[in-house]
Amino acid sequence: MVGGVDLGMRRDANVLVVVGQLPDPDSKGRPRFRVVWLEEHFALPYDAWIDRLVYLAGRFQFASLASEVLGVGDYPTTSLDRRPYEAGLGGVVIPVATTAKLKENGFGLIALLIQQGRLELPPHPGLLRQLAGLEIERGETGSSRIAVPERVGHDDLAMGLCFAALQLGAGELRPVVEHLVSIGELLDEPELDYHQIAPF
């Protein structure tokens, strides 16, 4: 499992998107993936959100958990990076600085995996709306800007998926053999009953 964390303040949400590797490869022997979990919380204090992420890190056994560090994300990510060590889960938090190139790479990989039939998305209206709303603007110098325009809404879920997908592209996803996590078992836990992913 890999996770992508996008941090918000007043208008934006705190988001976690989790991508897991499916047991069977595709017809060419390539790994397949699925978005298995997502959460979106508006106006949730950072302390409470970090507590939640540390708890989920213990349940999901992340290979990596990518979290943004620009803007308001710097301090919460630094704090999140310390907490898993305290819980014996050190080394999973990957600080990510959001740049135009990072977005190009992340969303390009997402598009490629979807076209290849190797990434399954849940029927979650917010995530699908944000991905469909992404626009690319090319500057005169050749630079690009990828974002969801304000008229469409937020891009927090899309960015969480982008951060997680980049961990797949970086080869960060490695199977954890000591403890295999069953999504079915997780869904039965009362502590996790407010997840916001639609069932498959």
Image (tube, grey):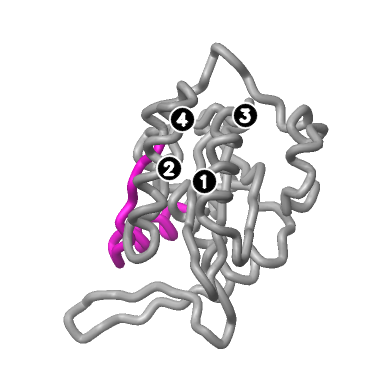
Q: Which residue is mark 2?
A: 80
Residue kind at label 2, given as amino acid type: Leu
Q: Position of residue 6 (x, y in %)?
A: 48, 57
Q: Which residue is mark 4?
A: 63
Q: Nearer the viewer, mark 1 or mark 3?
A: 1
Query: Residue drawn 64% across and 50% down?
Result: 38
> Residue 96 in magenta?
yes
Residue kind at label 3, given as amino acid type: Arg
Q: Is residue 23 visible?
A: yes
Q: Residues within 10 Å of mark 4 (few under 14, many from 20)?
A: some
Can you say whether 193 is above or below 179 in the image? below
Question: How many marks on residues?
Answer: 4
* Label 1 vs 3, first from the N-terminus: 1
Query: Residue drawn 51% across and 31% down?
Result: 62
Report the span colored magenta: 93-110
Residue kind at label 1, given as amino acid type: Ile
The reply to whether discs 2 and 1 touch (Cβ–Cβ < 8 Å) is yes
**Mark 2–mark 1 distance (CA, rounded to whole Å):** 6 Å
Q: Quadrant of the N terminus?
A: top right
Q: Which residue is mark 1?
A: 50
**Mark 4–mark 3 distance (CA, rounded to whole Å):** 12 Å
Q: Residues within 10 Å of mark 1 (few under 14, many from 20)?
A: some
Residue kind at label 4, given as amino acid type: Ala
Q: Which residue is mark 3?
A: 59
The overriding secondary structure of the stretch rendered in magenta is helix
